[in-house]
Image (cartoon, grey):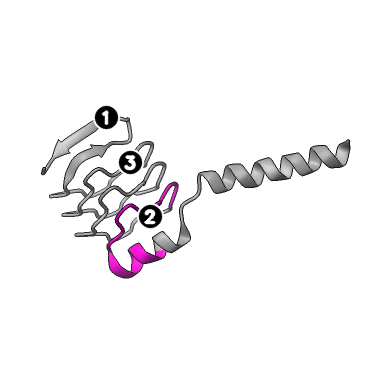
Amino acid sequence: MKLTLTALTVAATMFASSASAFDPADLQKLKDTYECRFCDLTDADLSSASLMRADLPRADLSGADLSRADLSDANLSAADLTGADLSYTRMNGAILCNTTMPDGSVIYSGC
């Protein structure tokens, strides 16, 4: 019984962490090309990242740490930023068309 409970706990922990983690290939693609359409960057650490003019339409950035990042002139159309940390993030000129913001509100800016 104890072995079964331990196995279930390990399996649940692995599932929970993989269900909310970003796709490492998507993160590398963003770093290499500054383009990542439909990417899964859930909970990614992008703090202090220089992402000026990055192309991120429909990207899932929910829970991501974007604090102190530079997203100036980035395309975040229809991106999901639910729960993301945007503390001190530069977003001058960013396209936020149908973009879900950290508080769950949807913005239509730059459409």
The answer for how far apart the CA atoms under marks 1 and 3 are is 10 Å
Q: Which residue is mark 3?
A: 81
Amino acid type assigned to the residue bearing label 2 in the image: Leu
- Vertical placement of 51 versus 10: above or below? below
The x and y percentages for residue 50 are 28, 61
The x and y percentages for residue 29 are 36, 65
In which quadrant will I find the N terminus? top right
Residue at the image position 16 percent from the left and 54 percent from the top: 73
> Could you tell me if the residues under marks 3 and 2 are in contact, i.e. CB atoms within 8 Å?
no
Amino acid type assigned to the residue bearing label 1 in the image: Ser
Instruction: Check disc 1 and report its element: helix, strand or loop.
Output: loop
The x and y percentages for residue 4 are 83, 39
* Disc on the earlier residue, 1 or 3: 3
Is-magenta flag for residue 34?
yes
Please rate how many residues cluster around mark 3, counting C-alpha atoms within 10 Å: few if below 14, some from 14 to 19, many from 20: many
Question: Residue 46 got which mark?
Answer: 2
Q: Residue furthest front?
A: 38
* Disc on the earlier residue, 1 or 2: 2
Q: Which residue is mark 1?
A: 105
Judged by its main secondary structure, the magenta piece is: loop
Magenta range: 28-44
Left or right of 23? Residue 101 is left
